[in-house]
Amino acid sequence: MEKQRHDRREKNLPDDPRGKGWTRRLIWVGLMLVLFACAGCPVLPWKQSRLERGLERSGFVHDRLSLSQGRLDFWMGGAGPPVVLIHGFGASAIWQWESLARKLSSDHRVIFPDLLWFGGSFCEGEDFSIDHQVRAVLELMDFLKIDRFDLVGLSYGGLVAYELASAHPERVSRVVLSDTPAREYTEADYSALCRRFGVDHISQVLLPETEEDVQRLLELAYWAPPWTPKFVRRETVHALYGSCRDQKRGLLDWMIESVRSSSDRPHTYRARTLLIWGEEDPVFPLEIGQRLARRLGARLEVISRARHAPQLEHPSRFYRLVRSFLARERSGGG
C-alpha cells in the first residue's frame, strides 16, 4: 500500500475519488443526510456553517465592503503575498474556494469575494458587464490597501481575472486560470456548447430550476459526481440558486454578446499565467484550453478524471499546482 502511495506521488497523479477515504466520507455524508431528512432540517445551511467554521478555525474573517449601489462580501485570512480567488458561476465563493483558501493561507494572504449578485454581494444597478465585476474587485483591493496581487480564477471567475489582468497589468503579478476560455471563446464554441446540452441558452444549464437540473450541474462539474438525494437537490434550487436570477441571466447575456465583440476590447495582457484544466470538462472542452495556452504561451496542466470543477474533485493536486506556480514565479524560476 505504501508503495502504491509512493508511486502515485512520484507520477503526480490526481487524488483518487474512489479511494478508501472517499468511501468513508460518502458513507458519513449519506448517514448525515438521512438524519437531516428524518428530522426535517435543511442541509445546506448546516453545510455552509461547517465551511464557515473551518475558515474561522484557520484564522479567516468574514467582512463586507459597502459600494455606491450595493456591497461586496469577502473572506480574508493568512499572511504573505496576497492572492485573490475569484469564483465561477455558482452559489458563492465559499462553496468553491474553502479548501484551497485554507491551504494557501499557510504562506499567502488570501482574499476571496462573492462577485456581484452571488452569495452575500449585490448591486442595485444593472451593469452586467465583466468590467463592472473587475471594478468591484479593484475597489476591494484599494480598500484593503493592496497594490499588487496574484489571481486565481475559475470559469466565469477566470473571465473576470483575465480582464482584470488585461485592463490593469500594473496591479497583477501572476494569474492561474482554471477551465475558463478567456478571450479564446468563439460563437462556434458557444453553439457547440448549446448542442451538447440540448439547450437554447446557457442559463438553462447554469441556473437550475428543478432537481434534475441540479443533477446535471453535478455531472458537468464532477467526473465522479457525489451522491445527492432528491430533497437536497430540491433545496439547492431555492437555497443556492433562488436569488438574483434575473441579474445572473443578465451576466450570461452579456457574456454571450461579448463573444461577438471581444476584438474591440483593449488588450494589454502580459501576466505570467498557468492554466489548469479538467480533462473531461464538458462546458469548456480541453481543446479550448490548448488554444488559449498557445496564444498566451502559458503552461497547461491537465487533471485527469476531472470535469469543470477540478479544485473540488482533486483539491490536493489543484493546490500543489497553484502553490508551486506562485512560488516558482516569485523566485524567478522558469
Image: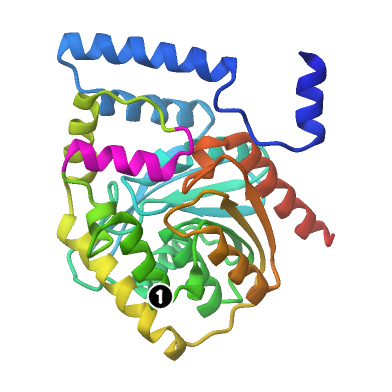
What secondary structure do most residues of the magenta stretch adopt? Answer: helix
Q: Is residue 40 left or right of residue 262?
A: left
Span shown in magenta: 210-224
Residue at 81% x, 24% y: name it.
6
Residue at 27% x, 47% y: name it.
120
Residue at 76% x, 59% y: name it.
329
Q: Where does residue 34 sit, x and y in percent of width and height?
A: 27, 11
Q: Quadrant of the C terminus?
A: bottom right
Q: Residue furthest bottom?
A: 264
Q: Where does residue 161 sit, x and y in percent of width and height?
A: 50, 65
In this view, 133 is above or below 264: above
Residue 314 seen in the figure: yes
Residue at 18% x, 9% y: name it.
38
Q: Secondary structure at mark 1?
A: helix
Q: Is residue 229 left or right of residue 16?
A: left
Residue 62 seen in the figure: no
**Residue pointed to by mark 1:** 188
Q: Where does residue 116 sit, x and y in percent of width and height?
A: 30, 59
Amino acid type at circle 1 is: Ala
- Give the colouring mode of the picture: rainbow
Q: Quadrant of residue 257?
A: bottom left
Q: Where does residue 288 sit, x and y in percent of width and height?
A: 54, 66
Q: Is residue 53 left or right of residue 68?
A: right
In this view, 315 is above or below 29: below
301, 159: nearer the viewer:
301
